[in-house]
């Protein structure tokens, strides 16, 4: 199979010094990482439409105040396989205030897998305790506790 670049959209959502993420783990290295929610852009779909669709599919959440931030190249290895993503990064907010409960976890459906989405304290990322991927997203995080 030919290697290809995968276009994706990710949503950066911040609230009270936290970011909304899912957790993953590399099976080969056993390293834990955190990532913004989002997913693949389908042919004929805008990157913003893909972002909105992915949030509805994954956690049944609608977005508002969607602001395009940047495009990032993400070349990495996971589970022993080389990958390349072209990320359209957006800052956004949830329509439903119920998603802003910092202590809650939310069921995240990705294909046939069910995972969790939750709020991660941004200071844990800045301190190096938690690894946000891709690291090129770090400059877009607000450093203050007021978001």
Image: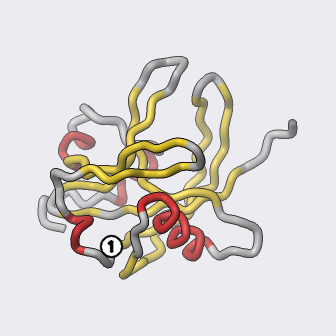
**Residue under the image location 33 percent in, 64 percent down:** 13
**Residue under the image location 41 percent in, 75 percent down:** 62
- Looking at this view, is 20 or 125 the one in front? 20
**Residue under the image location 58 percent in, 30 percent down:** 78
Left or right of 12 in this view: 146: left
What is the crowding at mark 1: few (fewer than 14 residues within 10 Å), some, or many (at least 20)?
Answer: many
- Looking at this view, is 75 or 38 the one in front? 38
**Residue under the image location 65 percent in, 64 percent down:** 41
Left or right of 112 in this view: 138: left
Q: Quickly name the residue at label 1.
A: 93
Left or right of 34 in this view: 41: right
Give the x, y percent position of residue 93.
33, 73
Give the x, y percent position of residue 104.
21, 52
Against 25, residue 60 (above or below) is below
- Looking at this view, is 45 or 112 the one in front? 112
Query: Which quarter of the figure is the C terminus placed in?
Result: bottom left
Query: Which quarter of the figure is the N terminus placed in?
Result: top right
Against 95, residue 105 (above or below) is above
- Would you identify the image quadrant in which residue 7 lies? bottom right
- Looking at this view, is 102 or 2 the one in front? 102
Against 58, residue 56 (above or below) is below
What is the tally of numbered marks visible in this picture?
Answer: 1
- Would you identify the image quadrant in which residue 133 lies? top left
State the SS at label 1: strand
Q: Which residue, as the protein is rendered here, is positioned at the far bottom?
A: 65
Give the x, y percent position of residue 106.
32, 53
Tell me how the rendering is colored.
secondary structure
Q: Which residue, as the protein is rendered here, is positioned at the far right?
A: 1
């Amino acid at each position: 199979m030919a290697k290809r670049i995968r276009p994706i959209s990710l949503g950066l959502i911040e609230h009270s010094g936290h970011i909304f993420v899912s957790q993953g783990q590399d099976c080969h290295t056993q390293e834990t990482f955190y990532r913004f929610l989002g997913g693949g852009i389908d042919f004929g779909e805008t990157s913003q439409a893909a972002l909105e669709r992915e949030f509805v599919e994954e956690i049944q959440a609608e977005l508002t105040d969607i602001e395009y931030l940047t495009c990032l190249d993400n070349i990495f290895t996971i589970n022993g396989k080389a990958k390349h993503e072209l990320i359209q990064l957006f800052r956004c907010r949830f329509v439903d205030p119920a998603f802003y409960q910092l202590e809650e976890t939310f069921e995240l459906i990705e294909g046939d897998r069910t995972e969790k989405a939750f709020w991660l304290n941004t200071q844990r990322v800045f301190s190096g305790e938690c690894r946000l991927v891709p690291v090129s997203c770090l400059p877009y995080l607000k450093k203050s506790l007021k978001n």
